[in-house]
Image (spheres, rainbow, N blue to C red):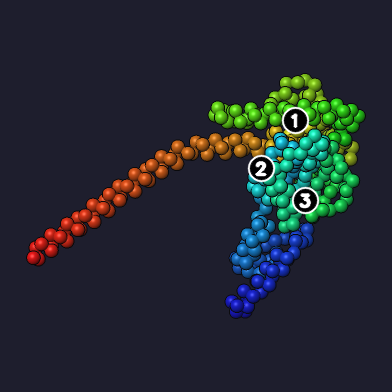
Amino acid sequence: MSLMGIGAAAAVRLGVALSSSHSAPAGKAISCSSRTCHHPSKEGVPWAAVIKMSHWRGTMPFMRKVRSVFVSDVHLGTRACQAEALVDFLREHPAQYLYLIGDIFDFWSMRRGVCWSTEQNTLIQKVLRRARHGERVVLIPGNHDEALRDYCGLSFGNVRLAFEWIHQTADGRRFLLVHGDAFDQVTRYHRWVALLGDVAYDGLVRLNLGLSRLRRWLGVPGYWSLAGYVKRKVKTALQFIYDFEGAVAQHARERGLDGVICGHIHWAAIKEIGGITYVNCGDWVDSCTAIIEHFDGRLELVAWAAHAEREEAAAAAAEPIAAQHAGKSAGAKVRLEKVALGSIALRQRQSVGAEIDGV
């Protein structure tokens, strides 16, 4: 086939791909040679055209960094929501599966007042974009966005709503995905106490934001959570966490599963409880934590707030070195300019001398 024919075929297939939001069938392998892509939906398209198409669509569908991402307790609509940090995290972790495990929206807090930022809009758009580009997105409502439970079983913008989900990892383990409020006795039977506690926790998080800004201004390294400190120091809070973890793990055991991944208590963890792998995603109002699954089935807890602190510290440490190198470069440039000017002046003097000698 001529180059013109190949280009025309690529353009046609590119237009079809851009107009379609369907992903490849599950279980289909993706293999690529140096010239041609053998993805099921792009058979025979030159690989360079597929790369160009992927950049055009704003994603690289063949370059998944992790297999699955699990996020909970984002609390969109509140001042404490760390939407910008979550956008950064998702940008660094493209995946095959994205699970939003409850309290993604905070309707409780929105009754008192809505705080919706540009970053929160960006987060919603990013999740919908990932769903359009073939990433499987499942939203499991929690107690703060329980109104969405009326729509479980439906899909909106390629995002599936479900009361719970069973996820099988790459190594064959089966995990129950559930928000976890059903195992919280306070939320179930003493709703007014839960609402009061929500207001108190919101106050702690807001105070923690101010303390974080003060620590950065004073140059204190590392991330510190006021809410986490209170939880660790208050015996009643610790006992509540232990009781919650035990109840969730027992439920997974009774259902014959290997583990459970939940949220709700804003206390990230990966641990073994009686032979059951208990996993909690944490939150994105205080600790900024999530769970990722690697392609070998291994689960990892990512503390993005601490990661961001380390990145900032590394950048701050690199600034003097960069400035020093910049100073050296500027000095070398000045010296080179002086040498060049001297050479020009010398040539001019030699030219004038030659003219005088000729006269």
Residue 322 falls in image quadrant: top left
- First of labels 2, 1 by sequence position: 2
Pick the quarter of the image with the C terminus. Answer: bottom left
Q: Which label lies toward us, 1 or 3? A: 1
Residue that carries the numbered disc 3 in the rendered image: 137
Residue that carries the numbered disc 2 in the rendered image: 84
Name the amino acid, label 2. Answer: Glu
Q: Are marks 1 and 3 in contact (CB under 8 Å)?
A: no
Estimate the x, y position of residue 18 in percent, counting from the top left.
70, 65
Residue 109 falls in image quadrant: top right
Residue 30 seen: yes
Q: Which residue is drawn at 81% across and 27% down?
A: 197
CA distance separating discs 2 and 1: 18 Å
Residue that carries the numbered disc 1 in the rendered image: 202
Name the amino acid, label 1. Answer: Asp
Q: Relative to residue 241, is residue 255 drawn left or right? A: right
Seen in the picture, residue 291 relative to 6 is either above or below; the reply is above
Q: Residue at x 38, y 42 (%)?
A: 327
The label number, if any, that marks residue 155 in the structure image: none
Q: What element carries label 2?
A: helix
Q: Which residue is drawn at 69% across and 39% down?
A: 82
